Image: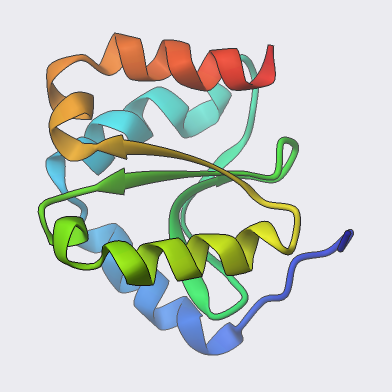
Amino acid sequence: MHSRLPYNKKLTPRARELRKKSMLSEVLLWDKFKKKKLNGLQFYRQFPIHNYIVDFYCKELKLAVEIDGAIHQIKKKEDQFRQRELESFGVSFLRFQSSEVEKDIESVLMRIKDFFS
């Protein structure tokens, strides 16, 4: 198990760009994460790990939270490969549909809290 995650500096500009172009579901969830609002945990938005960028990442939990929009129906195999590769570094994943975040964010937050309790 890796104690430190690989970081690709070349992804930093893309991560910044993604932060500026967030989907509604990402904005809603970020509002619940920022400033350590969720149980005092620090989450990062559009966080580069290895050769990928995850939607949200909590270093303390080694947890990536991904929000899947419609495009992810087409990219399922890519997403599975990417997830397996990042899990090999000890990263855990929770995935949610964007519609789920938009319609029932409290349920999403409960599932995230269940992960670390």
Quarter of the image for residue 60 reads top right
**Residue located at (36% from left, 35% from top):** 30
In the figure, is residue 62 to the left or right of 31? Answer: right
Q: Is residue 48 above or below residue 108?
A: below
Q: Residue 111, position in %: x, y?
A: 46, 17
Where the C terminus falls, by quadrant? top right
Residue 82 visible to the viewer: yes
User: Exactly how many numbered labels are in the figure?
Assistant: 0
Which residue is found at the position 10% from the left and 53% from the top?
A: 70
Q: Quadrant of the N terminus?
A: bottom right
Q: Nearer the viewer, residue 42 or 90?
A: 90
Query: How far across and down, in percent of the image, does residue 98 sit?
Result: 19, 38
- Which coloring applies here? rainbow
Tell me which residue sits at (30%, 44%) in the image.
Answer: 67
Q: Nearer the viewer, residue 81 or 95?
A: 81
Q: Residue furthest bottom?
A: 10
Residue 53 seen:
no
Residue situated furthest front in the rendering: 77
Residue 57 lies, with reference to residue 117, above or below; the image says: below
Q: Is residue 29 above or below residue 55?
A: above
- The residue closer to the viewer here, 101 or 28, is 101
Q: Position of residue 92 (x, y in %)?
A: 63, 44
x and y percentages locating residue 28 in the rendered image: 24, 30
